[in-house]
Amino acid sequence: MIRAWEKEARGKKSMRSKRIGMLACAVILCAALLYAVGIERDFKLPPGFYGLGRENGIWLAGPPDAISREELLELPRLPKALEGVIVGLEALYPAAPGRNSFQYELTVLKQGIVLQAVQSYGEPLIHDRVILAYIRNGKILQKENLEYHWGKGKNITAAGDWVLMHDGRVLTVWDDKTGEPAARIGLGAAEQQDGQAKQPGGQQSPASQADASWGTPFYVEGYPKEGVVILRHSRSDTMRVLAGGKLYTPYRDLFGEKCRRSIEGRPAIMAVEPTGDGLKLAAFEEGVLWLQVQPGPYCEEEVSGKQEVPYPLAGTGE
């Protein structure tokens, strides 16, 4: 006959065993969930912008302009979804002999990460294949394949908590805090305007003669305020601004006829001389874009050297 105190001890032991078992199951379940979203895979980068590469099978991340090994962080593993995108790209577009397949850049946000992979090709390397991928909680929310012929620009992929994803025709602005699209902005008006540029004698400029087979028409160059998009036309290398439902072409407002005709007549690549309009975004303050100017041929008389000029946008004041 078992004494009462022995029964009680056995009961407590049984309860402890059950609790340990339940705790073990919970730990296993959490580990499985973390694996599913890729968090457990030793990916520990604070928010920021990084170059990404491999050395002897180890992933390294650091400043894109890093010049020493000490500036780089080792990442034994990548999030599963990110690794899947990269593996797929390298299988689909293998590297030519003696060349790297892709250059990888990561924008790490509070919730998600954005990959921008660039592979240059052609002889010489004048074309760019660009893949953008927005990954959040282990899922690819948007992925785009872009092709730039004679490309000279670069996309930005984030501005604050906004993630900027586009296919050259539509820009989707994601809110990284919620993982939901905040806006979709059509870029067709900016492309249509380029076809209206005429050379003397009624001829279209070389840039506007190129059709869709020349690749993606735009880079997204800036998003200084909600609803204000800075674009760079990939063939004419000229700035466009979409703001408040209006389209702006700054060089046409800032420069005289001689300079405008020079800009519109430049080929995609010109030895030594700059292409496009030479305009870059410097700042945005109270509805005014401050543009850095580096003039090209026939524009020196109007703008002497590098400087910043104001360009107001109607209805976009702070």
Image: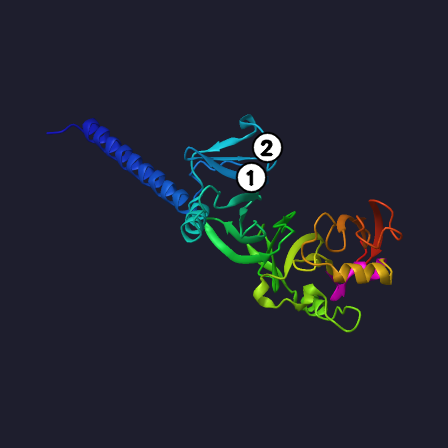
Q: Quadrant of residue 71?
A: top right
- Residue depicted at 35% across the width and 41% down the height: 26
Q: Residue furthest bottom?
A: 202
Nearer to me, 161 or 18: 161
Describe the element under mark 1 as helix, strand or loop. Answer: strand
Instruction: Kindly identify the amino acid type of the residue bearing the numbered disc 2.
Output: Ala
Residue 158 x, y percent position in the rendering: 62, 49
Describe the element under mark 2 as helix, strand or loop. Answer: loop
In the figure, 41 relative to 87: above or below? above
- Residue depicted at 55% across the width and 58% down the height: 146
| Residue 153 located left or right of residue 245 | left
Rendered-image quadrant of the N terminus: top left
> Can I make out residue 314 in this image?
no
Nearer to me, 244 or 92: 92
Instruction: Kindly identify the amino acid type of the residue bearing the numbered disc 1.
Output: Gly
Magenta-drawn stretch contains 248: yes
Residue 8 x, y percent position in the rendering: 23, 30
Q: Which residue in the structure is indicated by mark 2? A: 66
Q: Which residue in the structure is indicated by mark 1? A: 51
Say whether marks 1 and 2 touch (CB < 8 Å). Answer: yes
Region rendered in magenta: 242-254
| Residue 309 located left or right of residue 224 | right
Say few, some or many: other residues with alpha carbon within 10 Å of mark 2 (under 14 / 14 to 19 / 20 or more).
few
Q: Residue furthest right?
A: 301
In the figure, 229 relative to 49: above or below? below
Q: Earlier in the sequence, mark 1 or mark 2?
A: 1
In the figure, 86 relative to 259: above or below? above
Q: Quadrant of residue 150?
A: bottom right
